[in-house]
Amino acid sequence: MASTMYYKTYLQLDTLLNAQHPESYKTGKPAHDEMLFIIIHQTYELWFKQIIHELDSVRQIFSKQFINDNAPDLQVAVHRLKRVSTILKVLVHQIDILETMTPLDFLDFRDLLRPASGFQSYQFKIIEAMLGLKFEQRFEQHYYVSHLQPQELELVRQAEQQPSLLDLVQHWLERMPFLKNPEWWLEYQPLAPENTNRDFWTDYRCLYQQSLSAEEQHYLQIFDEIFIKGNPTPGRLTPAASRAALFIMLYRDYPMLQLPFQLINTLLDLDELMAMWRYRHLNMVQRMIGSRIGTGGTSGKHYLKGALERHYVYVAFAELTTFLIERSRLPQLPDRLKSALGYSFS
């Protein structure tokens, strides 16, 4: 006879509900709000575990040599990244609950936490690495290295050594066939007289230049650096990936480019929500402890402000909007390519 599964057993509630041990209770002077503090941060770590689970599955999808556009792969990846985005929204709003604790409530048990600190959340650092934050881009790297235990630091290092989601998406963009297959461009009608090679980007560069005001003409040089010459700045996409991403943004209304556009847009959502979480955390810390040093020895609000400004991962995608032009002025795509980008009917 098969055993009967029970709710409490399945969720291991005995372990979960007995994992809160406020330090203040051990002193004989229990601080009421310490229970809230513990539960909020345990909940964060559970959500971090789920985010890692989702990001790992998405990385596996983009690690494939070939992603079939007619298979569920891209749909699944976008769906799971949107789930991560929704979870991050929950994490941001959880700060509302934590802020029901006043500074005096926190001081009732704050000193008992030293040297523990949210900065020691190795799962959060793994998430940052999985998304694409490189060690050399981290703000105040000595804090990052010194506050983790050796086994936790090793886990983060392993995450950093694996291809990040940013790396994998860039490789996927470089393989995008719509700009490479010459058969789809045989009937392309160039707009610029000098475009004797019937090159889409020669036309687009001319149209972009025409859209710039006199004060904006320097953007043409930046255009060349990003889309033609390449820029070795950390976090910058390769020219091929930049061209593919911009093409997706420009022609996103075609069915085959809708999911790729949603992917790029969701990555930007993740960056924005991570920044929002840091911003809310910064304001909460300033509200709770002012300019004092964090319990883990970090510089408190100074560190959080620096991380907020420096730890964007997908800024290269955000900057592509600088190089958009109006839909009405876009070059007309050849019919063969339009057909490839649309739904096929036999």
Image (cartoon, rainbow, N blue to C red):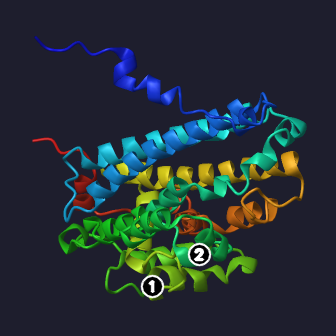
334 horizontally vs 114: left or right: left
Residue 342 pos. (x, y %): 27, 48
Residue 152 lies left or right of residue 338; in this view the side is right
Q: For the point 87% across and 46% down, which residue is it?
A: 287
* Residue at 77% from the left image edge and 31% from the top image edge: 33
Q: Earlier in the sequence, mark 2 or mark 1?
A: 2
Q: Which class describes the residues within 10 Å of circle 1: few (<14), some (14-19), or many (20+)?
A: some
Identify residue for label 1.
Answer: 228
Are the residues tagged 2 and 1 within 8 Å (C-beta)?
A: no
User: How many C-alpha atoms fall within 10 Å of the one at disc 2: few (<14), some, or many (≥20)?
Assistant: some
Tell which of 252 and 189 is nearer to you: 252
Q: Position of residue 186 (x, y in %)?
A: 22, 72
User: Could you say whether the residue bearing mark 2 is in a helix, strand or loop?
Assistant: helix
**Residue 316 appears in the picture as rendered:** yes
- Residue 271, given in percent of the width and then of the height, sits at 57, 56
Give the side of residue 39 with respect to residue 193, left or right: right
Snapshot quadrant of residue 288: top right
Toward the viewer: 189 or 86?
A: 86
Query: Can you tell which of label 2 and label 1 is closer to the viewer?
Result: 2
Tell me the CA gap for discs 2 and 1.
25 Å
Name the residue located 32 percent from the left edge and 14 percent from the top edge: 6
Q: Nearer the viewer, residue 318 or 83?
A: 83
Could you say which disc has been placed on residue 137 in the image? 2
User: Measured from the top left, where is residue 81 in percent x and y?
Assistant: 43, 46
Instruction: State whether residue 330 appears in this view.
Output: no
Amino acid found under the numbered disc labelled 1: Ile
* Residue 278 vertical position relative to residue 200 in the rendered view, above or below: above
- Mark 2: which amino acid? Gln
Residue located 40% across and 26% down the image:
12
Q: Quadrant of the N terminus?
A: top left
Q: Is residue 127 left or right of residue 93?
A: left
Q: Quadrant of residue 72?
A: top left
